[in-house]
Image (tube, helix red, strand yellow):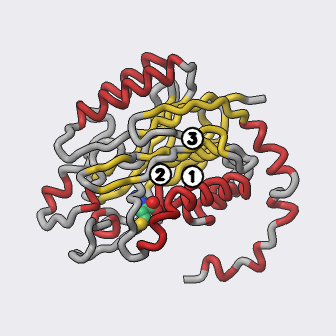
Amino acid sequence: SRIITVGAAQMGAIQRADNRPAVVKRMVELMREAASHRCDLIVYPELTLTTFFPRWWMENQDDVDAFFEREMPSNETAPLFNEAAKLGIGFSFGYAELTPEGRHFNTALLVDKTGRQVGKYRKIHLPGHAEHEPWRAFQHLEKRYFEVGDRSWGVWNALGGNMGMMICNDRRWPESYRMMGLQSVEMILLGYNTPRHNPPAPDHDRLSEFHNQLVMQAGAYQNGTWVVGVAKCGVEEGCEMIGASSIVAPTGEIIGQALTQGDELIVARCDLDLTRSYKASIFNFEMHRQPEHYGRIVQQ
Ligand code: CDT
């Protein structure tokens, strides 16, 4: 067996007035807790460092850019990197990335136990809309504030396994998992900010947690991989976001799930070798896939 002990670090609400040092302090507390459970890796949500700002229409680009990171680590995030190196724990978290060329991405980073930044992923499936829609109680302006990620889904050999990342809405799309499944991924790390209320389809609201579980369980099973799904949740600036952070086995079963809507660590010992029987039998891609019949999937 190849065990990775993982901590899914669900984070409760982060209000607009909460500054980065206060958020990083909460992250460090969860990291220490994870280390006390001998975690090899701790996973934080999408856009961990600030409130979920795409809920607001902002006309002034400086107001938007205030939510972005120009360097990583920065002075404000350095305590997280330093603590991880001290504790010898790997970590993954999401942040809004502003590149030196002025490009804006919704990004996730993977850092190994030595503090090396081994992997970066930039969100591809950006949900929501690009123009102001005042009829909505809350905007979802990811299509305005971010560019579609400029690289595909990578898989990195780190922490003793094949690790991949996706971000929030990506989890609803089978292609995201399959792109990593085709690279023998063994554990997918994914953070999310999911408002319970979806203004264009309010009839889905009651199903928010069900759909969250449905897609992660299916993605894990169909690709023979672990999935670690981590929420930022609770009521942020009056907007409720779902919790239910989950660790899903390659069997498709949820083996750990958060109970609260606040900062909460869930821990699981994940045997990466559990992926093998799925990858070697029912989902032996080489033996059973029929890509010559999948052409429509990649047509524009
Ligand atoms: N952050 C993010 O991607 N949230 C989306 C909301 C979809 S409704 C606009 C999600 O898929 O959870």
Q: Would you name the residue on which mark 3 appears?
A: 257
SS state under label 2: strand
The N terminus: image quadrant: top right
Give residue 76's position: percent from left, percent from top. Answer: 24, 32
Q: Is residue 180 visible?
A: yes
- Mark 1 vs mark 2, CA separation in Å: 7 Å
Which quarter of the image is occupied by the C terminus? bottom right
Judging from the image, what secondary structure is the residue with disc 3 in? strand
Q: Give ligand 1's quarter of the image.
A: bottom left
Q: Residues within 10 Å of mark 1 (few under 14, many from 20)?
A: some
Give the vertical position of 299 relative to 232 (above or below): below
Mark 3 neighbour class, 10 Å CA radius: few under 14, some 14 to 19, many 20 or more: many
Tag nearer the camera, 1 or 3: 3
Callout 2: 10 Å neighbours few (<14), some, many (20+)? many
Specify which label sits upstream in the sequence, 3 or 2.
2
Is label 3 within 8 A of ligand 1 (CB to nearest ligand atom)?
no
Decide: marks 1, 2 in contact (CB < 8 A)? yes
Question: Which amino acid type is marked by label 1?
Answer: Gly
* Amino acid under disc 3: Gln
Instruction: Give the spatial CA distance, label 3 vs label 2.
Output: 25 Å
Q: Is residue 281 above or below residue 22?
A: below
Residue behind mark 2: 121
Q: Position of residue 281 (x, y in %)?
A: 87, 53
Give amino acid for label 2: Tyr
Task: Give the Cα separation between the discs numbered 1 and 3.
Answer: 26 Å
Q: Is residue 85 left or right of residue 152?
A: left
Q: Secondary structure at mark 1?
A: loop
Mark drawn on residue 154: 1
